[in-house]
Amino acid sequence: MTLRAIVFDVDGTLADTERDGHRIAFNQAFEAHGLEWRWDVELYGKLLAVTGGKERIRHYVELYGKQKPADFDDLVAELHREKTRRYVEILEGGKIPMRPGVKRLLMEALERGIRLAIATTTTPENVTALLKCSLSPDSEKWFEVIAAGDIVPKKKPAPDIYFWAMEKLGLNPESCIAVEDSENGIRSSLGAGLKTLVTVSDYTRNQDFSGAAAVLSDLGEPDSPFGILAGESFGRHYVDVDLLERWHA
């Protein structure tokens, strides 16, 4: 079946946002609310097993036995709003670039008539800010569908977010390929029936990517080849639409 759309995850896939973006913003939000909670690099890597920022806060409090105030639900919501605001400020400071090959592949796909979509657990505000600050001011318009945040009840690794994106695109999964960076992400995309390319991030390199079409270090550039962790690259050294079509087939 012909490849008609590429569906991208965001955090860790389009950009390395987790360690020096989201983690920092969470810590700033905790400090602003007078909480002695600090997520170092190692701890945050463990917390990433839980998708969704509000869910991650709840998991941390439960796991480490932190005292819950009477208004805990309101606190979680407020912390997440503050974290999102701080994260956007980090993005606006230009500190989080796109990963290698991302902009090149997106532009080629548009030129070739391949539709673009996003399927992510992060909030719509985070997606918009990343695209505008790290890609192009008008890049939000490049994506026909942005499936983000709480629009579905179950987040990754559940396949719901991909099913939602497919419905909005009006396509079946066999017409699409997903690009992910994590085990939770590929479980979600494969669960929805999409073939999936994985480009690992620092936090996900050693996760289980069984079922991936290929597992790479990144998308690569003509002068900076990707590294192959698993799968067949068909003699290519950077990901373009032709190579995606090979994996998709």
Image (tube, rainbow, N blue to C red):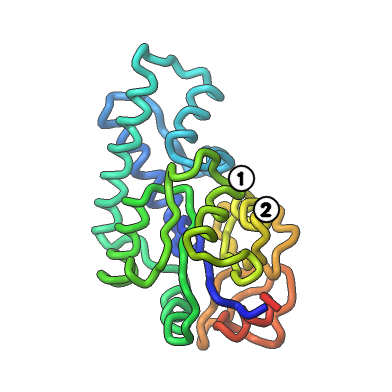
Residue situated furthest front in the rendering: 170
Pointer 2 local density, CA inside 10 Å: few below 14, some 14–19, many at least 20: some
Disc 2 to disc 1, how far (Cα)?
Answer: 7 Å
Point out which mark residue 58 bears.
none
Q: Residue at x 46, y 55 (%)?
A: 11
Pointer 1 local density, CA inside 10 Å: few below 14, some 14–19, many at least 20: many
Give the left or right position of residue 95, taking residue 101 as reference.
Answer: left
Q: Which residue is drawn at 63% across and 80% down?
A: 2
- The residue type indicated by label 2 comes to Gly
Tell me if label 2 and label 1 are in contact, CB under 8 Å.
yes
Q: Residue at x 54, y 78 (%)?
A: 220
Q: Name the residue under label 1.
A: 158
Can you give x and y, in whole percent of width and height, for residue 158 in the image? 61, 45
- The residue type indicated by label 1 comes to Ala
Q: In which quarter of the image is residue 97?
A: bottom left
- SS class, disc 1: loop
Can you give x and y, in whole percent of width and height, for residue 181 in the image? 57, 59
Which one is in front, 189 or 222?
189
Which one is in front, 215 or 248?
248
Mark 2 or 1 closer to N-term? 1
Point out which mark residue 191 bears.
2
224 over 142 or under it: above or below: below
